[in-house]
Amino acid sequence: MINLRATLECGQVFHWTETEKGLWEGLIGDELTAVRGEEGQLKVVRGDGPLVARYFGMDHDLAEVYAGFPQDETMLEALDFCRGLRILRQPAWECLATFITSSMKQVVHIRQMSFALRERFGRSVPGSAWQAYPEASRLAAASEDELRACGLGYRAKNLQATAQRVASGEADLTAWEALDDRGLRERLCTLPGVGRKVANCAMLFGFGRLSAFPVDTWIARIMRRSYWRGRKKPTPLALEQKLASRFGPHAGYAQQYLFHHARMTQRRARG
């Protein structure tokens, strides 16, 4: 089962495009891919089947994931709204870099920056109108002004500095995959532009750590309203630690369902 629209529009990835009703095109690394969701199943129209299935987390046992969700009204409403949303396995560098540029930005703006970086610095992909996300070495060689021209603002300096560390091998993302969650988070947080929220996003969407629980403004609001019983306003770290423990090994799934449900329903209410 997969809810393709929710999976691709929930804020975990920013370049997939619905080119015609129900047909989504995007790149997995530099592999041009087209998929449909038909009766809750993933149909690969173009691309390598096993690669696509892995990217879309089709091996995640959603029944097991849902069984671990708390049975409260807030979570059940989010589950009903998002059922079939899957956590992607994105290329680690692309995911990390994208979330470094996400600070204080809405999804539409992150998407614009992603496409601008691809167009200016990415490799051409045969048969595709899009370029692959730029390699770390390419962004490391770019000037801060060139990155700012892609709409990054102050984020340009952090992206450039982190790209330089990754390109030089000082930050070996491949080797870091072997670290436990705590060790991986600590290493990621040493990189420019990476705090706990960005680190947790990279862990969840780029390193497959399904227990990672990013806390942003939306999630903090939900958590304080529905799950926090203390009198004192909690810090984001306190929320992350308490609620990651509460939601268990699939806390990242719970986070993404709560986030997407809140963002979409509140946006509709305002409209």
Image: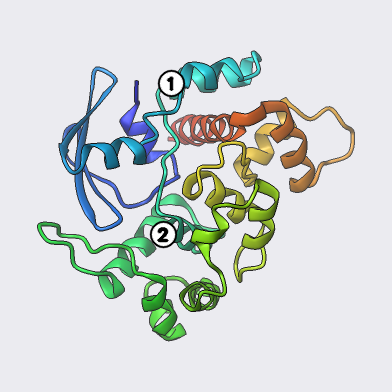
Answer above or below: position of 56 versus 206: above
Q: Which mark is residue 13?
A: none
Query: In this orientation, does residue 189 appear?
Result: yes
For numbered disc 1, what is the local secondary structure? loop
Q: Name the residue at 45% across, 45% down.
A: 12
Q: Name the residue at 43% across, 21% down.
A: 83
Residue at image mark 1? 83
Q: Give the x, y percent position of residue 54.
A: 35, 38
Q: Name the residue at 70% across, 49% down.
A: 182
Residue at image mark 2? 94
> How far separated are the C-alphas under marks 1 and 2?
26 Å
Q: Name the residue at 47% across, 36% down.
A: 267
Q: Quadrant of the C terminus?
A: top left
Mark 2 is on which residue type?
A: Glu
Answer above or below: position of 3 versus 234: above
Query: Is residue 36 or residue 262 the one in the foreground?
Result: 36
**Could you tell whether 257 is left or right of 34 in the image?**
right
- Residue 176, located in which quarter of the rendered image? bottom right
